C-alpha cells in the first residue's frame, strides 16, 4: 500500500525518508484480526521487532535497574495523555517503537526487564525491547546508571539462545532473519559523555562512537539479523539547553553551529558505514531515518509536516532539557 501511495502523490526528500523507514518496518505487519490468535501460533509465522537504544525507544527498562531518577521517567507527568500513568517512557504518551508496533498491528513491545514479561515468554511472538534511557554506544557513557549497548547485545544473545531452545536452530534462524531490528543510539555519547570525550579530538571520538555502533550491527548480523531500521542523531546544537547557553553567551538563541558540526560528522560517518556494511554483508538491509534533516526542515517549514511530527519534535526536545551538552565545551576545536 505504501508503494501505491508513493506512485500517486509527490513527496519531498524528508517525507520519502520517512516513507522508506516505514516500508521497511511494514514487513512485520500482520492482519489485525490475527492478533488474538498469535499466542497459539509459532512465532516463525510473523516478523518480530527487536529494539536497541536510548530514551527515544525505552519503554521502561530503567524502572528495573539501580539508577538515579535522572534516568527514569516513572513519575508524573510522564504517560499522562495515553497510558494515564507513568510507564517509564520519556514521553507523555508513546514512543517511536510503540507507533511502529501499532502501524504493524502488533501489541506494544514491553520492557525486556519487566518481571512479568522477563519470566514469561508469551510476548516473544511480538518482539523484545532492550532500550535504556541515557544509554550510549560507548560503555563509559553514564556507566553504571544505564543499560549500555554492549549489555543490550548480551540480552539479545540470551533471546537468541531462548529462541534456539524453543524452536530449534533452523526455525530460530528464520525468525531472526525475518525480524526488524530498530536502533537509536549515539546522542548520549556527546551529551553526557565519559571522560574519554575530553581525551580525544572530536573526529577521533566520533570514530569511536561509530565504531561501537558498527560492531553492534555486525554482531547482530552474525547472530542472524538482516533487516535494520536506524535513526541518526538530532541536531545537538538546537536542543533547548544549547540555545539557552547561546543566549547566556550573548547570542540570539539560535542553534549552536559548533555542536551541530559534531552531529553532522557523526551522521555522515554513520551513513557511510551503513553503505559499507550493505556492500560487505550479504543480505544486510537497512533504512536510515534522517532525524537531523527532518528536524531542521520541520523547524523551518512546520506546516509541511502537520501536528504529528511537531509533537515528535516537542517530545524529543523536552527529552534532553535535563542533559548537559558537554559537546559544546569541546566543539570549538572542530
Image: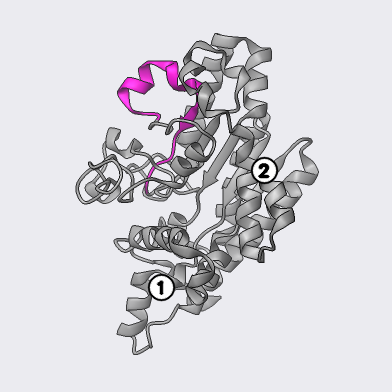
Q: Nearer the viewer, residue 95 or 3?
A: 3
Q: Is residue 153 magenta?
A: no
**Left or right: 86, with 224 as reference point:** left
Q: Secondary structure at mark 1?
A: helix
Find residue 244 and report its horizontal and vertical position in percent: 32, 77
Above or below: residue 143 compared with residue 27: below
Q: Please say whether residue 90 is visible from this viewpoint.
A: yes
Q: Which residues are magenta?
A: 112-133
Marking on residue 31 = none
Q: Nearer the viewer, residue 326 or 103?
A: 103
Report the mark closest to the observer, 2 or 1: 2
Above or below: residue 16 compared with residue 79: below
Marking on residue 329 = 1
Above or below: residue 21 compared with residue 102: below
Find residue 135 and report its horizontal and vertical position in percent: 42, 47
At x 55% / y 71%, what residue is drawn? Answer: 297
Q: Quadrant of residue 256?
A: bottom left
At x 70% / y 54%, what residue is drawn? Answer: 6
Q: Please say whether residue 203 is visible from this viewpoint.
A: no
**Left or right: 214, with 108 as reference point:** right
Q: Decide: few, some or many residues near mark 2? Use Cα within 10 Å; few <14, some 14-19, many ≥20.
A: few
Q: Is residue 129 magenta?
A: yes
Q: Decide: few, some or many residues near mark 1? Use Cα within 10 Å; few <14, some 14-19, many ≥20.
A: few
Q: Nearer the viewer, residue 132 or 48?
A: 48
Q: Residue furthest left?
A: 76
Which of pointers 2 and 1 lies earlier in the amino acid sequence? 2
Q: Secondary structure at mark 2?
A: loop
Q: Which residue is mark 2?
A: 1
**Left or right: 252, with 19 as reference point:** left
At x 33% / y 84%, what residue is drawn? Answer: 247
* Label 2 – label 1 distance at C-alpha: 47 Å
Amino acid at each position: 500500500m505504501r508503494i501505491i501511495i508513493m506512485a500517486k502523490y509527490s513527496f519531498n526528500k524528508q517525507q520519502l525518508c520517512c516513507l522508506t523507514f516505514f516500508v521497511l518496518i511494514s514487513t512485520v505487519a500482520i492482519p489485525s484480526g490475527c492478533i488474538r490468535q498469535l499466542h497459539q501460533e509459532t512465532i516463525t509465522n510473523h516478523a518480530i521487532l527487536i529494539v536497541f537504544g536510548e530514551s527515544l525507544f525505552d519503554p521502561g527498562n530503567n524502572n528495573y535497574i539501580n539508577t538515579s531518577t535522572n534516568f527514569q521517567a516513572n513519575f508524573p507527568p510522564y504517560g499522562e495523555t495515553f497510558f494515564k500513568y507513568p510507564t517509564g517512557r520519556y514521553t507523555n504518551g508513546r514512543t517511536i517503537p510503540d507507533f511502529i508496533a501499532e502501524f504493524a498491528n502488533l501489541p506494544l513491545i514491553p520492557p525486556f526487564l519487566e518481571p512479568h514479561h522477563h519470566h514469561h515468554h508469551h510476548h516473544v511472538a511480538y518482539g523484545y525491547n532492550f532500550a535504556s534511557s541515557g544509554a550510549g554506544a560507548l560503555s563509559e557513557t553514564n556507566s553504571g546508571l544505564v543499560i549500555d549497548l554492549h549489555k543490550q547485545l548480551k540480552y539479545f544473545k540470551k533471546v537468541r539462545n531462548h529462541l534456539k531452545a524453543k524452536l530449534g536452530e533452523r526455525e530460530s534462524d528464520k525468525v531472526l532473519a525475518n525480524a526488524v531490528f530498530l536502533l537509536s543510539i549515539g546522542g548520549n555519547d556527546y551529551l553526557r559523555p565519559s571522560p574519554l570525550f575530553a581525551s580525544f579530538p572530536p573526529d577521533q571520538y566520533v570514530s569511536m562512537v561509530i565504531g561501537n555502533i558498527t560492531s553492534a550491527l555486525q554482531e547482530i548480523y552474525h547472530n542472524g539479523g538482516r533487516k535494520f531500521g536506524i535513526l541518526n542523531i538530532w541536531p545537538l546544537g538546537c536542543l533547548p539547553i544549547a540555545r539557552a547557553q547561546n543566549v547566556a553567551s550573548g547570542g540570539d538563541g539560535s542553534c549552536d553551529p559548533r555542536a551541530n558540526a559534531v552531529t553532522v560528522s557523526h551522521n555522515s560517518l554513520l551513513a557511510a558505514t551503513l553503505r559499507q556494511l550493505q556492500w560487505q554483508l550479504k543480505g544486510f538491509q537497512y533504512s536510515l531515518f534522517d532525524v537531523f534533516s527532518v528536524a531542521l526542515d520541520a523547524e523551518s517549514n512546520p506546516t509541511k509536516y502537520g501536528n504529528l511530527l511537531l509533537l515528535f519534535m516537542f517530545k524529543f526536545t523536552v527529552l534532553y532539557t535535563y542533559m548537559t551538552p558537554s559537546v559544546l565545551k569541546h566543539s570549538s576545536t572542530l
